[in-house]
Amino acid sequence: MTVLRAGPMLRMLVLVAGLACTQGALAQGAPTAAAAAPGTPAASDAPAPTPAPSSGVARPNAEDPALERRLQAVTKELRCMVCQNESIADSHAPLAVDMRNEIREQLKSGMSDRDVIEFMVARYGNFVRFRPPLDWTTYALWFGPALLMVIGFGVLLSQLRQRRNLVAARAMPELTAADRAALDALAAGSPNDKTGNR
Amino acid sequence: MNRAWLPLGIFVVLAVFLGIGLTLNPREVPSPLIGKPAPAFTLPTLAEPQKQFSVEDAKGKVWLLNVWASWCTPCLEEHPLIEALSKKGIPVYGLNYKDKEVAATAWLKRHGDPYRLSVVDPTGRVGIDYGVYGTPETYVIDKQGVIRFKHVGPLNPQVVERTLLPLIAKLRAS
C-alpha cells in the first residue's frame, strides 16, 4: 500500500522539479540568460583596464527632460550586450554608455522610439530586446510557461481525483456475504451485540 | 503503469535540453548581419591618419575585419593566429576599437602588426554598426562585400581550421 501511495507523491515531486527546470530552461534560452560565464573573452575584456574614451559622458540632460524620459524608456527596453542582464539604462559598461549617447542623438534627430529599437535590433539581433517579438522561434518562450502550468494543473487534478477514489475505496470496502449477514443481524437487534464490540 | 512514466519522460526531455543549454555560451549571440552587406564606413588609418579606408576599397577580395584594441587582453591571445592567417595571404584589416592612437601604435610595434592596415574608431560608432560587443571580433567579408561569418572572442585554432579557412577557400572559389 505504501508503494501505491508513494506513487502520486513521487509524480508530484517530479512534476514540481520539472516545472522548476522549465523556468530555468526558458530563462536560459531566453534573453534572461543567467550570470555571464566567467573567463569568456568578452567577459574578461568588459572591464577594460584603461576604459577607452567614450564619445561623451552620459549625464542627465537637464535642458530637455522630455527627451531624457524617452531615452530612459527606450534604453530600459534594450539589453546591454556586455553585462547581459542589465539594460542599457542601468549598465555602466562603456558600450552601454556609447549606446545611450547614440540613442540620445537619434532621438534628438527625430527618430521614433520604435526606429531606435529597430536600429539596435538590425545590429545586435533580437537578443538586445528584453521583450522579444512573437514569432515561431519565440512561441515556446511566450506560451511555454502558461502551457506548462495548464499541464501541471491537469496532472495535479487527475492525481487528486485518483487519490480521492483510492481513499473512498478504502473507507468503504466491499461487503462480503458474511458481513451483510452480521449487519442484518445487528439491525434486527440481535443479542449478539452483548460482546460490547461497538 | 504507463502514466507513471510520463512525468519522468517529460523530466528527461527537459533535463536533456537543459544539459544542452548549459554547454552553450550565452555570450555567443548570432549576428543579424550575416548575409548582409558589411556596414559602410570611411575611417582614417592608424598608420597614416590623413589616409582613409572604406569598405568599398576591399571589394573584390575575401577579407577579414578584425576588431582589436591595445587594452584588450584576449586580442593578444589571438594575435599569433591573426599573424598566421595574414602570412597565408589572407588580407586581414584591423578595426582599432575605442583605443588611443599612441597606445595602439605601441601595441603593434611591440607585438607585431599582422594587418594590411588598421582603421581607427575611437568613439566606437562604427563598432555599433557592426554589432561589436566584445573585442576581439572577426568578420569574414566576401568579394561582394557581404558579411559571411562572425566570430566573437579570440580566434582559436579549431575555429580557424574548421570554419574560417574552409569558408575563405569556398568564398574565394566562388
Image (cartoon, coloured by chain):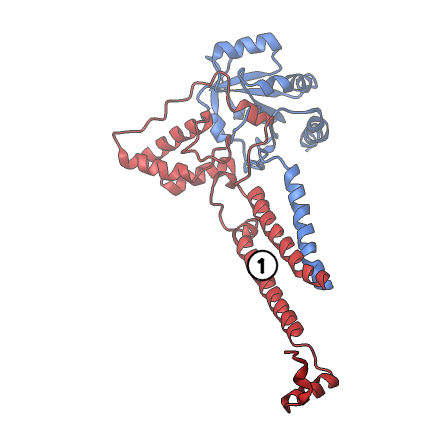
Label 1 packing within 10 angstroms: few (<14), some (14-19), many (20+): some
Question: Front-most of B22 and B50?
Answer: B22
Question: Front-most of A97 and A148?
Answer: A148
The answer to which quarter of the image holds residue B143 is top right
- The chain shown in red is which? A
**Residue at point 66% right, 84% down?**
A193
Q: Is residue A74 above or below residue B48?
A: below
Whether residue B104 is visible, yes or no, is yes
Q: Position of residue A171 (x, y in %)?
A: 64, 73
**Residue at point 74% right, 86% down?**
A177
Name the residue beneath numbered marker 1: A152
Which colour represents chain B? Answer: blue
Q: Position of residue A163 (x, y in %)?
A: 63, 67
The answer to which quarter of the image holds residue B116 is top right
Q: Is residue A3 above or below residue A181?
A: above
Q: Dividing the image into 4 quarters, which one contains the C terminus of chain A?
A: bottom right
**Residue at point 53% right, 41% down?**
A31
Residue at the left extreme, as displayed: A63
